[in-house]
Image (cartoon, rainbow, N blue to C red):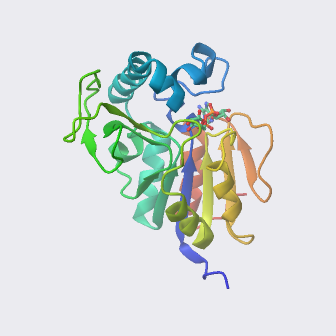
């Protein structure tokens, strides 16, 4: 028996495209990170084992860029949605622009740049905000080298069950700025209910998820427009 849909609950599921207009690179666009770096060199446990300095440098650069960036009109519109609805942000992004915009319930499924983690004890996290770099020799209380608190390819996603629970009961789902290329994160969207209002905003996507209305364009234009309709009690036409 599926739980009741909550018409007051909105899940906003985001990817790198929502932070693009804050100046942060996406991954798979023509100027994306995976054009500049190979995943195997900087975003796998094997990369960490063979060249920790390169991996640390990759995330230190991104941590500094994220700290220097500011939330944009799309992040701020998502924050405004909380005036009228229970809003759960589920993000693949590792920046903290949603939190800095004012969103109060943000679930990260791929980790967060602003924390370092013991490489031997997942429960030991250390705040590395203000763009602070993690260096070789930075160790946890148990003496192990600190690593980025990021989900690498081949590692388990974070908060999957919590994210799924919210998708199943959401009355509305707004997806913003993701190519839906990476599973299981992208697969969580399939848990949204048939009669929930479902919208995806993105510049371009290979395969639109079934049941979602696709609005092509930039997040800073389309997200405030959709959220304005929802705040005025209107369905998005
Ligand atoms: N407005 C709206 N959408 C945009 C904008 C913008 N200004 N700029 C880019 N986009 C869209 C692109 O069209 C694309 O569909 O955002 C999406 C970005 O896709 P990816 O670069 O694949 O980023 P994302 O979907 O977040 O990647 C998922 O892959 O490498 C892993 O862990 C990494 O969390 C990341 C995951």
Image quadrant assignment for residue 138: top left
Left of 5 or right of it: where is 19? Answer: left
Q: Nearer the viewer, residue 96 or 79?
A: 96
User: Whole-percent x and y of residue 200?
Assistant: 68, 49
Task: Relative to 214, say whether 11 is above or below.
Answer: below
Q: Nearer the viewer, residue 117 or 100?
A: 117
User: Whole-percent x and y of residue 35?
Assistant: 63, 16
User: Whole-percent x and y of residue 96?
Assistant: 38, 40
Extreme residue in the left direction: 141
| Picture residue at 31% right of the left edge, 39% below the top | 118
Classify the position of ligand 1 by quadrant: top left, top right, bottom left or bottom right. top right
Q: Quadrant of the N terminus?
A: bottom right
Q: Nearer the viewer, residue 26 or 220?
A: 26
| Picture residue at 66% right of the left edge, 46% below the top | 183
Left of 97 or right of it: where is 133? Answer: left
Q: Quadrant of the C terminus?
A: bottom right
Residue 24 seen anywhere in this rendered image of the structure: no
Left of 63 or right of it: where is 90? Answer: right
| Picture residue at 58% right of the left edge, 64% below the top | 164
Image quadrant assignment for residue 34: top right
């Amino acid at each position: 028996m599926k739980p009741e849909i909550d018409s007051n609950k909105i899940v906003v599921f985001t990817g790198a495209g929502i932070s693009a207009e804050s100046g942060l690179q996406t991954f798979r666009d023509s100027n994306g990170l995976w054009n500049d770096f190979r995943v195997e060199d900087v975003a796998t446990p094997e990369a960490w084992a063979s060249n920790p300095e390169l991996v640390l440098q990759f995330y230190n650069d991104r941590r500094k860029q994220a700290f220097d960036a500011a939330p944009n009109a799309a992040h701020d519109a998502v924050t405004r949605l909380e005036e009228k609805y229970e809003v759960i942000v589920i993000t693949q992004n590792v920046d903290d622009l949603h939190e800095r915009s004012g969103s109060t319930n943000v679930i990260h499924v791929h980790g967060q740049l602003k924390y370092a983690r013991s490489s031997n004890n997942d429960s030991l996290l250390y705040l590395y905000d203000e763009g602070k770099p993690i260096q070789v020799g930075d160790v946890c209380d148990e003496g192990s080298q600190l690593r980025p608190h990021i989900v690498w390819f081949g590692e388990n996603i974070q908060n999957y069950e919590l994210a799924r629970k919210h998708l199943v009961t959401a009355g509305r789902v707004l997806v913003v700025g993701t190519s839906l290329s990476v599973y299981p994160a992208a697969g969580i969207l399939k848990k949204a209910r048939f009669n929930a209002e479902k919208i995806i905003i993105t510049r371009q996507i290979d395969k639109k998820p079934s049941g979602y209305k696709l609005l092509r364009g930039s997040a800073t234009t389309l997200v405030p427009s959709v959220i304005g309709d929802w705040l005025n009690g209107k369905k998005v036409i």
